[in-house]
């Protein structure tokens, strides 16, 4: 029996995007609506001119939202408002049930399964949903609130490429103290210190903001899964995103997470597949 050349990690991580992956909407728009802000006016009259002036779109959106709040005499936009809106967000069918089901399958393989969320949106919205408790960590854009709880500044942004940084974080194993030091040097990170290899990560996302993550996951042999709305077709999605071969997906699935759905089956098969690879490694070590 030859020794495996790589150390074994007994973990699998499933990483979800949030907007249009676990919920049918863009959570930022739901927040705007709830704050009685007209979405078209906000995007066309406020955000668009800034983007034309070379602003990053997500920074521009946050800036305009903060300005709107500051201009108000009453009904300022606060952390409590974000929590209230987050609690009301509608999840895709079956989403609340997937975590226990997937944990059960991982248990059958004697594998530790962890869930993570990497959102391009305001993460305090996602953190207020009923499914937040299932995630080991949730990352996204973060707002700074003043002493009255009013939104005041964007303290953390999550661009499309920034999302990949968090894949590396969770792969290396993160604690608060060293979070800042872990970036930009994945390839030289010693194998024996990797907590969850990227090959043992499943990434589920719906769109353009997920393409850099699909690329990284493919590069390291993980499983990338695309999601499209139930009322659209897979062909439309592919056409829209113009996916290249380096960004290819293991499956492109409708956003339905119910028990007999293709999505649920795909996630279970992904766990089976990675578990089998881990079992093979264990075998080679004679475990
Ligand atoms: Mg999305």
Image: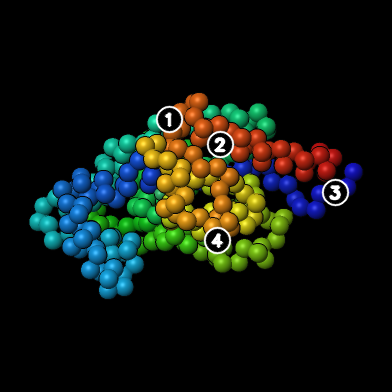
Q: Position of residue 76 (x, y in %)?
A: 17, 53
Pointer 4 or 1: first along the chain:
1
Residue at left offset 36%, top offset 53%: 121
Alpha-carbon span between mark 2 and mark 3:
30 Å
Nearer-N-terminus badge (4/3):
3
Observer-nearest residue: 259 or 106?
Answer: 259
The residues tagged by marks 2 and 4 sit, at their Cα atoms, a distance apart of: 31 Å
Q: Give the CA distance from mark 3 to mark 1.
A: 42 Å
* Residue 128 point in image, percent of width and height: 34, 41
Disc 4 marks which residue?
178
Q: Is residue 72 left or right of residue 211?
A: left
Of helix, strand and loop, which one carries label 2? helix
- The residue pinned by badge 1 equals 94
- The label nearer to you, 4 versus 3, is 3
Residue count near mark 4 (Cα–Cα under 10 Å), binned few <14, some 14–19, many ≥20: few
The answer to which quarter of the image holds residue 152 is bottom left
Asked which secondary structure carries label 4, the reply is helix
Quadrant of the image containing the C terminus: top right
Residue farthest along the right direction in this orientation: 1
Residue behind mark 2: 267
Q: State the image quarter where residue 103 is shown.
A: top right
Residue with the mark numbered 3: 3
């Amino acid at each position: 029996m030859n020794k495996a050349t790589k150390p074994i990690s007994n973990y699998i991580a499933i990483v979800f995007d949030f907007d249009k992956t676990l919920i049918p909407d863009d959570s930022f728009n739901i927040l705007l609506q709830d704050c009685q802000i007209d979405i078209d006016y906000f995007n066309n009259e406020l955000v668009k001119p800034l983007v034309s002036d070379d602003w990053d779109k997500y920074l521009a959106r946050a800036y305009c939202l903060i300005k709107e709040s500051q201009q108000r005499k009453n009904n300022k936009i606060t952390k409590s408002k974000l929590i209230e809106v987050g609690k009301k967000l509608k999840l895709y069918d079956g989403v609340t049930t997937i975590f226990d089901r997937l944990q059960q399958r991982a248990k059958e393989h004697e594998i530790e399964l962890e869930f993570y969320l990497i959102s391009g949106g305001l993460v305090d919205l996602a953190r207020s949903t009923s499914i937040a408790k299932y995630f080991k960590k949730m990352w996204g854009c973060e707002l700074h609130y003043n002493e009255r709880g009013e939104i005041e500044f964007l303290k953390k942004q999550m661009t499309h490429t920034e999302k990949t940084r968090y894949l590396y974080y969770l792969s290396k194993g993160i604690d608060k103290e060293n979070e800042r030091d872990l970036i930009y040097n994945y390839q030289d990170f010693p194998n024996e210190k990797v907590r969850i290899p990227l090959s043992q990560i499943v990434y589920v996302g719906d769109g353009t903001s997920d393409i850099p993550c699909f690329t990284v996951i493919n590069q390291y042999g993980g499983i990338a899964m695309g999601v499209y709305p139930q009322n659209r077709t897979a062909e439309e999605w592919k056409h829209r995103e113009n996916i290249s071969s380096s960004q290819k997906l293991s499956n492109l699935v409708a956003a339905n997470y119910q028990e007999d759905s293709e999505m649920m089956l795909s996630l279970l098969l992904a766990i089976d597949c990675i578990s089998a690879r881990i079992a093979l490694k264990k075998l080679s070590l004679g475990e």
